[in-house]
Image (tube, helix red, strand yellow):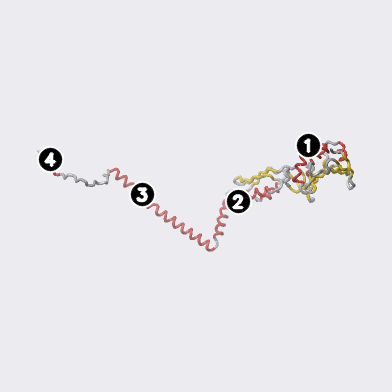
Amino acid sequence: MRLARLQGKLNRRSPPVRGARRSSKPIKKGVSAKASNWMYAKARSVRHGHRPRTIALGVFSGVLSTILLGLWLSGHLNDAYDAGLRYSENRLLASGFAVEHIDISGARHASEDEVRKALGVEPGELVFGVDLVAARARVKSLGWVREVSVTRLLPNRISVVITERTPYALWQYNQQFSIINVSGVAMQVTDPFAHLSLPLVVGKGAQLEAAKILAKFETQHELAIKVHSLIRVSERRWNIRFDSGSELYLPALGWEKTIDQIANSPDTLRLLDLPLVIVDARMAGQLAVRRKNQQAKQVPKLIS
């Protein structure tokens, strides 16, 4: 009986149609359906939640653009910009970013007042407003300064560190005295009596050639201690003036050899100790000796 019923139910089922398309929609379980609905709900809430914010930003941008356009058309845009800068600067000054200290180190020959004047920074101005590059260039233009660094030390300090040139000689030209370094760079016009220990070079171009001849005299100390000054003549050669008032005329070429020969000749050294004597060594192989403002007297074979 039961078998007959079961057989009848099976017979009543229609056979599957060949080629029929199965449904691609998966059968969702209860948990998956809830998760999917929750995700869609969150996405809708986010989209709807951003909409008022987007509208507010759009309105603000439009108002700001309108204000800027109006200021530009009326010619007051720069005034508004300047006012904004002044407001920001005043706020920074009130917060303690005003220059209160200027530290200067390394300045021995250049005075601090001179450095401060060249620096161009006044106490009370905004520390961020200091143009460090321009300030460094102004300080470096001072004659004594070889290198300089200018830095900001927040909140209220400017630091200046100077490396000075080394004094090498005193240079006189056109009735002015300047200190020069070994490269011939003139540092400043100065009082010559303040630097009596420095050798004195005189004349146009003397500052550029001083290092060569002074280096040579360093090897002939006995002759060098008698020297009063070195005079550059026509930017070609040297006259050496001694403390006695005598002078030695050096040739344009081969003057190094002449200095050695003079320094090794006791007779010539005694001549240079006499007052107002000129020893002319410009002619190779001989000396011409005369008193100043007198005709030269030949002294042959003193230099061979």
Q: Amino acid at mark 3?
A: Ala
Q: Amino acid at mark 1?
A: Thr
Residue 251: quadrant of the picture? top right
Front position in the image: 181 or 148: 181
User: Which callout, 2 or 3, points at the residue further toward the start of the chain?
Assistant: 3
Q: Which residue is mark 3?
A: 43
Work out whether residue 224 can be spotted: no
In the image, residue 211 sits, relative to residue 61, either above or below, namely: above
User: Which callout, 3 or 4, points at the residue further toward the start of the chain?
Assistant: 4
Which residue is located at x 69 percent, y 44 percent? Answer: 146
Instruction: Report how far apart the C-alphas of labels 3 and 4 lie in the structure.
Output: 53 Å
User: Which callout, 2 or 4, points at the residue further toward the start of the chain?
Assistant: 4
Front position in the image: 35 or 170: 170
Front position in the image: 110 or 290: 290
Q: Nearer the viewer, mark 3 or mark 1?
A: 1
Q: Which residue is mark 4?
A: 7
Instruction: Report how far apart the C-alphas of labels 3 and 1 lie in the structure.
Output: 94 Å
Which residue is located at x 90 percent, y 47 percent? Answer: 295
Q: Secondary structure at mark 1?
A: loop
